Image: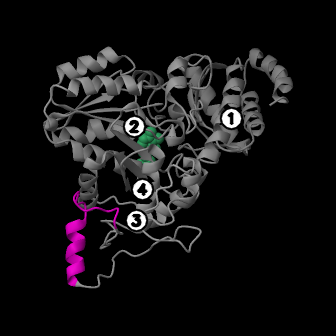
Amino acid sequence: MRDRSDRYHLESRLIHGEMISRHWNYQDHIVPPISASSAYRLETAERGAEGFVEFANPDFNDEQRPPIYIYDRLDEPSRGMLEENLAAAEGGESCVTFATGMAAISAALGVLLKAGDTVASHRNIYGCTYSLFVNWFPRLGIEVVFADFTDLEQLDAMLAAHPNVKVVYGETPSNPNLELLDLEAIATRVEAFNRDRPAPQRVFTLIDNTFATPFCQRPLIHGIDVVLHSLTKGIGGFGTDMGGAVIAPKLLEPDLLLYRKDFGGALSPKAAWPALVHGLPTLALRTRRQMDSALKVARYLESHPAIDRVLFPGLDSFPQAELARRQMRDFDGEFAPGSVISFRLNGSPEEARAAGQRLMDSLAKEALTVTLAVSLGQIRTLIEHPASMTHAALPVERQLEAGIDPGGIRLAIGIERARDIIADLERALDATSTSEQWRHVRARHEVAGSSV
Ligand SMILES: *Cc1c(COP(=O)(O)O)cnc(C)c1O
């Protein structure tokens, strides 16, 4: 493989990939080919035997020649090319992809944990990861303890109190509250803790980097061991396919490949291909546009009296603005606060929930640029209201107990024109306004809106 990392910017390399890849020499193609073969012809029985010996074998030097492909679930070229580029984007040694983000998260934890081990997790994490921890891990004899890792004393206390901790797990920015974790501080503390422990007792740090994407944040440079992604979100970017990825040190790659072979959950080459040819090559371009619009939209929302509070790492008012500026940086070191905004409507919990519902219904009916849907990081702006959607079954008091803000709304900015997104939000806020105050606000924004 030609190493072009010195000569060209990472952004250009993510567009062109490696034309002579260890996975496939596609010198004569402009677009990397999509492969569709569940099994591979083996010229001789000896070559077949060799392929099985080489698979997931750390002693096989895969820089010398392409792998011997046997069966899609083991290894496969289109997927392999995507893995090569994802590892480059995160600055990692190896990448293993999976059918979904959750399959990637389960696999990374699966290779590091066994019965009797403990996971120390930040308390604010993606809902299905939380469900994996509380509904499935206890069945496997794996304990999960939660703390607030924005307070590093709590991390120290947890490591001291639970000798069987093998994984420290978190997500930053977190879903849906956009809490940030100080990656360098966490890595430093775990590293100090590991110093006194024998190698098999080593604690690994795992960070779900889905919200930021590698364009806005690369946890490995801050000392984190393993990065997880849902490719379904910002990396895939177009909302057509699901996928997941684990970017890990080379020493974990064989186990990740063997885990994927035996538990399944391999990423289909047909789903790897869009991420490789559309997603990664446009990641920088899409994300820059989304971030630019997100800042405009966040400022607009912040100025709107019908809205109680706006959280966006790019705002000066963001509670962890200093950390955001230190940690969320693009490939050139520029501040890159991502494209997800969280905001809360005014009112008592009941009022805020009802107002959230009205806002969603109005957007669903009238708006072109804002779509009522879960997911994020797509070319389309998506909005969702957990209190009236995913958690609508719970009464308001129970929602509050579960940490769900009845007026909390998540807005994931797409690549539409910012002024159209703002106009759609404005129309919906106006249409669903009930108070004198809101009507008063409308007049003011008709003037302000024309400048964005
Ligand atoms: C969506 C998401 C996941 C799960 O990814 P899937 O591809 O839907 O399985 C995990 N973590 C975060 C932060 C997510 O947003």
Q: How far separated are the C-alphas under marks 1 and 4?
A: 29 Å
Identify which residue is drawn at 23% across, 47% down: 111
Where is residue 38? Give x, y as percent.
Answer: 36, 74
State the SS at label 4: helix
Compare marks 1 and 2 and give the one earlier in the sequence: 2
Task: Name the quadrant where ligand 1 sits.
Answer: top left
Q: Earlier in the sequence, mark 1 or mark 3?
A: 3
User: Which stretch appears magenta?
Assistant: 45-64
Instruction: Please name whichever residue, 266 or 187, is drawn nearer the observer in this view of the structure.
Output: 187
308 w.r.t. 173: above or below: above
Residue 43 image offset from top left, x and y in percent: 29, 85
The circle drawn on residue 22 is: 3
Label 2 packing within 10 angstroms: few (<14), some (14-19), many (20+): many
Query: Percent from the top left, x then y, of residue 265?
Result: 33, 58
- In front: label 1 or label 2: 2
Determine whether the residue tagged by mark 1 lies in a helix, strand or loop.
helix
Q: Quadrant of residue 181?
A: top left
Report whether 316 appears left or right of 120: right
* Residue that numbered label 1 is attached to: 292
Magenta segment: does it hold 254? no
Comes first in the chain, label 1 or label 4:
4
Q: Earlier in the sequence, mark 3 or mark 4?
A: 3
The residue lying at 63 percent from left, 48 percent from top is 379
Mark 4 burial class by Cα count in 10 Å: few <14, some 14-19, many 20+ = many
> Image quarter for residue 71?
bottom left
Residue tagged 2 = 220
- For residue 260, say whether it is visible: yes
